[in-house]
Amino acid sequence: MSKRSSWFGCSAVQVQNFMASTLDLLRRLTNERVDYILVGGMAAVAHGSSVVTEDVDVLVRFDLETMTGVIRALAPVQPKQRMSPNKPPLGADASQFVGYKNLYLETQDGVLDLLGSIVGVGDFEATAVHSTRLDLGGFQCRVIGIDDLITCKRTLGRPKDLRVVLELERVVRARLSGTHL
């Protein structure tokens, strides 16, 4: 089942609750001064796409400082490693995650995927170069640049990603022509 189809039948309140939980996860990271970049479906939405996603993808450095902040930020929402068969808690030892490539979490506020690089773009530093700041009502976060997001989605090449590419290319054309979608 695609992520998009699972939203069918959801009430507006359920969608609003998801969005509030998503913002709460990002706010928690921001409050702990975790250096992250919003990527994936939520970044596409931030750039003007109508894609619907059920998780939050953020690009981070898997170093001790970042992972210590992630653990502190998420402790109140009981993060678990969702790709491990027994879904162990994230725990308090940040050093065990240093050098990871990706870490997939499930929390009381929703799913959060921590990524170490972006396909077709590169690592944190490469992605940060063209990232933009987004005001989320009370806090700001960095978002992958629209051109880098298009490159990533095109490189992934899945049908759902290619649909997002088409939408984001329309957004870019509209911005260049000074029109609104």
Image (cartoon, grey):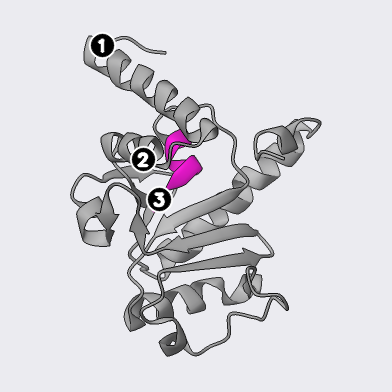
Q: Nearer the viewer, mark 1 or mark 2?
A: 2
Q: Residue at x 56, y 56 (%)?
A: 24
Answer with the quarter of the image where residue 37 lies.
Answer: bottom left
Span shown in magenta? 38-45
Q: Which residue is mark 1?
A: 178
Q: What's under tag 1, amino acid-wise? A: Gly
Q: Give the prevailing secondary structure in the magenta stretch.
A: helix
**Number of other residues with Cα within 10 Å of mark 3, as a class: few under 14, some 14 to 19, many 20 or more:** many
Does any portion of residue 137 appear in the rendered image?
A: no
**Number of other residues with Cα within 10 Å of mark 2, as a class: few under 14, some 14 to 19, many 20 or more:** some
> Looking at the image, do the residues carrying marks 2 and 3 touch, with CB atoms under 8 Å apart?
no
Q: Which residue is mark 3?
A: 38
Q: Nearer the viewer, mark 3 or mark 1?
A: 3
Q: Which residue is mark 2?
A: 155
* Dot placed on the residue nearer the N-terminal end, 2 or 3: 3
Direction from residue 11 to residue 43 in the image, left or right: left
Q: Nearer the viewer, residue 161 or 97?
A: 161
Q: What's under tag 3, amino acid-wise? A: Leu
Give coordinates of residue 97: x percent, y percent.
44, 81
Give coordinates of residue 95: x percent, y percent.
41, 89
Q: Residue at x 36, y 50 (%)?
A: 140
In the image, farthest residue toward the left: 129
Direction from residue 26 to residue 77 in the image, left or right: right
In this rendering, the answer to whether 85 lies above or below 40 is: below
